[in-house]
Image: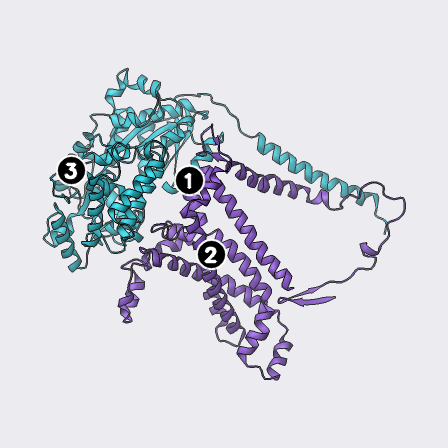
Amino acid sequence: MRKSPNLRRRRRVIPAISIASFLAFVLAACGGGSTSGGAGSATSANITWWGWTPTTQVAEQYIKAFNVKYPNIHVTYKMLTIAGYNAALRPALASTVGPDVFDVAPGGANGSVETYSPDAVNLAPAVEKALGSDWQSKLSPIGVSSLMIGQKLAAVSVGAVYSGTVWINENLFSQYHLSPPTTLAQWTSDCATFKAHGIGCFVQGVGQTAFNEDTLQAISDNIQPGVWAKAIQGQVPWTSPVIVKALTIWKEMFSDGIMEKGALGVQQYPDANNDFMSGKYAMVMMGTWYMQYDTQAGMSAAISAAGVASPKNFTALPIAFPDVAGTGHTGALYGDSDYGLAVNAKSSNQAAATTFAVWLGTSTAGQEQVANALDDIAALKGIEPNWSNISLVNSGTQQAALSKLITNAVSSSEPRLGTVTPNLQLAIGVASTTVASGSATPAQAAAALQAAAAKMPNHGAV
Amino acid sequence: MTSTEAGTTVSITRQPNAAAGRAAPKGRRRGPRRPPGLPWILPAFIFVVGFVYYCIGYTGYISTLNWDGVSPNPQHVGWANYVQLFHDPVFWDTIRHTVLFFVVTFTVQTAIGFTFAALLHSKVKLANLYKVIIFVPVVLAPATMAPIFRQIFSATGQFNTILGDIGLGSLEHPWLAQSSTALPVIMAITIWEWTGVTFILYFAAMTQIDKEIVEAARIDGANGLRVLTRIVWPSVRGTTIALAMLSVIGALKTFDVPYLVTLGGPNYATEFLGTFIYRVSIPQAEVGYGAALSIMLLILSLAGALAFGLRGMRRN
């Protein structure tokens, strides 16, 4: 059959159009965007902020307060999961359409400031402009040193978090006429009482190993303060008798019935957090970030999120980690900047982004917002929560406890996770779980940890 | 021509003047013959080569680097990541877990899926309802189910409660907290989730079996079990091979259930290649090593698929 000239022409034209369209699409995609690093306006722009913290609700409070002073800078906050943050941020920063402002944190784990420093602008001149030449003395030292890479201030610390505390459900302690534990024996006894009444005692998500480090550091500081931090720096071997004893006590917490049954299969978030919030357990190992749940609204939301249909707030209080080694060294707190705001070096709105980051991290108005959210301890010295504006669940008991916690925390200089690389964190996690499961003795686990750390650059310290 | 094979019927009608038998008119074409469909497939071809194979090649290149994924100065380390991989005990753990996972999940899913498909081909009341019940887990997102399974298999969970209630309290166990039981739980969840697919494929394959053959076997005195083992099972062999191939690839790519339920723990007891690659590449920021593991995953997937594919072809 002969084909008509029209049909033949169409057969040639259609593939040509399809190829041309495809190439046009590819070229358009490849050519999109720009590498403009223009500063833009410092008082008017639409900027994006990516972070894993704070919650969207808290971020909106910050932005609302910021807009009182800078009404023409519109900030859009995108909250990402902790687990997904690095995976999302890496390609975003490699592109030209990444966020204008992004969270970073000390240490080598999530949002590592070391990792993302090359993508951030130096904020030291902007902070100096805001606070004066003695700006460093006006900010929490832990927030400045941990976010400085060389001479570059890669991010402005928004606030700090500290760990080393056990949080208790005071209602349950009162109900069963128990006192918060101060020794290992009392802890064991309290747990026996709670269990006899069908209440879980101490919940920890041992399966999510990063939090095991908090407990191990608390035990180690109880045995001999400072050894844990030195071990991280490679100044003390992990086979030190203090660390071995810490692992031994850690194991005893499982065998003595302090840790919940099946703790190795539990994750700190959401499992342990939900178990505590729903009143199933009387104690949990958490840090200063748990202060936010002492507010009426914060606790109601947390209890609802834990799956309780009709939330009934209870009094949550921080207590010092019990004197499990019998040394009397209690009350150790260790912390880092929770997160800092970095400004994307490729942002076309650098000036506005810098305005926002510096305002939140250094201005009195911004830091009051941070302090009042009770999520972080303010980075600007002298800023404390305005208790008259905060509705606590039980202000009579909680306000004094929280004030004391904040006072003790800001005086601490012991780092938490900020000086630990992910590889060392993983090795510590393995040591904690192998001891907990009984597949290694404390001495064996400590030796394996030491062997792993010895292979790491700088012994696994940042 | 009609051929019946592996539960499918293929009809091929031979065209008169097919290309093989047709002589090209003399003098019409000179030079190399141009493939007639090339312009049509070119966009898709460019897309596949440009994106998919380029990405594979780029991953291969990254696997020769010591790189955190963002640093502007990655260090070229040659084959060092592959050497590290073969000396990494966690890597070998993941291979062992994958093999065990494939054997158990494939065997159990095949047994349950085949049995359900055969049962629902007989005259069963409410057959459609059963089909829906069996298939529903397939459409439920693992992210939704993970917290539920963590609760069910926790030390104080419903599974232990049921064991206690039926007098098997001695078997109560913190299932996810022990290395010896965490992997079987992950397998059980996977079987629950994916048996619906096995069932539906076997069910479809069984509808292709010529009923006359089954009737002839019954007239010859074959009972139900014999019909199943001698007629139905061989007839769905193609489906079984396809499922085996998919199961190998699925086992190698396993990520969501172990990551969401156990985070690969305790003590790497439920670590798979997928979770290991993620752990290494993202939290530990060893992107080069993660890329080497990814290339290894690709090689193993191809090898597994080829092994089953060739086995199926040889039998044919």
In the rendered view of the protein, which quadrant contains the N terminus of chain B? bottom right
Q: Secondary structure at mark 1?
A: loop
Instruction: Tell me residue B149's x, y (percent).
Output: 36, 57
Q: Which residue is mark 2?
A: B99
Q: Say which mark, if any, is on residue A331.
A: 3
In the rendered view of the protein, which quadrant contains the C terminus of chain B? bottom right
CA–CA distance in space, label 2 to label 1 = 25 Å
**Tags 2 and 3 both on a single chain:** no
Q: Which of the 4 image quadrants contains residue A110?
A: top left
* Mark closer to the chain start, 2 or 1: 2
Residue A363 shown left or right of residue B204 in the figure: left
CA–CA distance in space, label 2 to label 3 = 49 Å
**Tags 2 and 1 both on a single chain:** yes
Seen at 54% across and 73% down, the residue is: B121
- Mark nearest the camera among 2 and 1 is 2
Density class for disc 3 (Cα within 10 Å; few <14, some 14-19, many ≥20) is: some
Report in which chain the residue with disc 2 lies. Answer: B
Chain the render paints purple:
B
Q: Give chain A's shade.
A: cyan
Residue A3 shown left or right of residue A231 in the figure: right
Quick check: can you spot residue A205? no
Asked if labels 1 and 3 touch by Cβ distance under 8 angstroms, the answer is no
Q: Residue furthest top?
A: A133
For the residue pair B62 and A73, the one nearer the viewer reads as B62
CA–CA distance in space, label 3 to label 1 = 34 Å
For the residue pair A381 and A429, the one nearer the viewer reads as A429
Residue A227 position (above or below residue B129): above
Q: Say which mark, if any, is on residue B282.
A: 1
Q: Which of the 4 image quadrants contains residue A423?
A: top left
Instruction: Tell me residue A59's x, y (percent).
Output: 33, 35
Density class for disc 2 (Cα within 10 Å; few <14, some 14-19, many ≥20) is: some
